[in-house]
Amino acid sequence: MMSKHPKKLWLSFESWLLDPPNVVLHPCVHLVRNVLRIFFAVGRDMTSGQLNLHAMSLVYTTILSIVPMLALIFSVLKAFNVQDALTPMLHRFLEPMGEKGVEIESSVLSFVDNMKVGVLGALGLIMLIYVVVSLIQKIERAFNAIWLAPQLRPIGERISHYLGVILIGPVLVVSAISLTASTMNLGFVQSMLAIEPFGSLFVFLTKLMPFIMIIFAFTFFYFVMPNARVSFRSALFGGVISGCSWQASSLIFTTFVVNSTRYDVIYSGFAVGIVLLIWLYMNWLILLLGSSIAFYYQHVNQITRHYKLEACSELIEKVGLDIMRYIALRYDSDSLPVKQVEIEGLNAIPVILSRTIMNKLLEHNLLLIAGEKSDMYVPAHSTDQISVAAIFKALRQDKAALLTVLKVGPSVDELIKKTNDDLYKGLEHVTLRDLIK
């Protein structure tokens, strides 16, 4: 009996956490429950292994692209003669690695100095930009997987977005740092700092500023990178959690590096590379976990008991038809696209199912993505040109093409074929416009 007791407690807690509450909860209890639900969902995603795979993939791409990326950024900053301001940021990132971090920083800066962007030639410059863009594209893919975004941004928007992050972002950051430093040297500011408590407050903020900058960097990534509408509040929540986690992991990793002399004996010259791989993996994992936290903070009602759902064909068809009907009705009435979050709230099903159904409709060119944030939908054709039979075929798609190689008895094959033919013939002349009228 005693052995069953912990299991019963866990089942009771899981029911309280994941099932809809029977009574109205106190605001404080509601807040605690939501926070626990978020971390439960993130932990469940972590154990599924997808976040680990994305983190390891990003480590590999980072190793390939870190020198070209820094070379490109340093070349841009040299045009403004502020390239030296980026070195402390690199030092800050590698600081938890101790002496090995100093060694890596020196090697990376030496490689960057040897890679002269100006003498690479047109082909070399294109290859350099390609390597850098591939890293950012892989980051977007990882974020899109977390946010269940259907696809990457359009190619034109992607190029302008990525180049803005690579070329303009570092200039703005360094300019902000330089402007802050020059402002601090003004006589008026110096006289204000001589008055208490402004002086002590400034010292406190100076010590706190690196931590704030890290939180800002995480928040910026969560807000900008996914091809989905992310609220600033959700991005900030994820940024604060991941920023605190990064600081904690830095302290833990520093202790690990200090006590890892045995790795120098085992791996010899490879020890630096091993430590760098572990540190990069921890950073990418923290970044992705923070994005997952931001997602569930924004979609807390989508945390369900069963996160791997297998919907029956009737549910998929019913929801898919209703999504098409709703989007067509709105578009025919006021010619405006429908927001993704609005569609997700249309039916009481988990967001992952509605996204899966919408992806089927997108792949068969029945819906088009619209809006500046690519988070709105419109019919791909005039509503009188979309047949209900075409919607059924899209929702019943055999993506793996298993039906073409499936061997069944002739009577079964004939029955299924006749059933489908009757259905499609009966709906062939029924259009989406008929459905909304």
Image: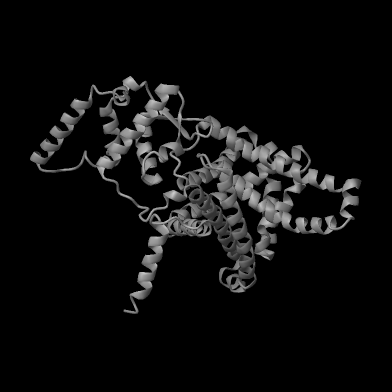
- Counting from the top left corner in percent of width and height, residue 72 is at 66, 41
> Which of the 4 image quarters holds residue 262?
bottom right
Estimate the x, y position of residue 422 in percent, counting from the top left: 15, 29
Question: Which sits in the foreground, 284 or 110?
Answer: 284
Compared with residue 424, is residue 257 higher up or lower down, i.e. above or below?
Answer: below
The image position of residue 395, as x and y in percent, is 29, 36
Residue shown at the point (11%, 41%) measured from the top left:
412
Q: Residue at x 61, y 66 (%)?
A: 253
Is 383 located above or below residue 45 in the figure?
Answer: above
Q: Provide residue 85's location: percent of width, then percent of height.
A: 76, 48
- In the picture, the quarter occupied by the C terminus is top left
Give 71 or 424, whichever is nearer the viewer. 424
Q: Quadrant of the N terminus?
A: bottom left
The residue sitting at 25% across, 28% down in the picture is 389
Q: In this view, does 167 lie above or below 191?
A: above
Residue 379 shows up from this direction? no
> 40 left or right of 400?
right
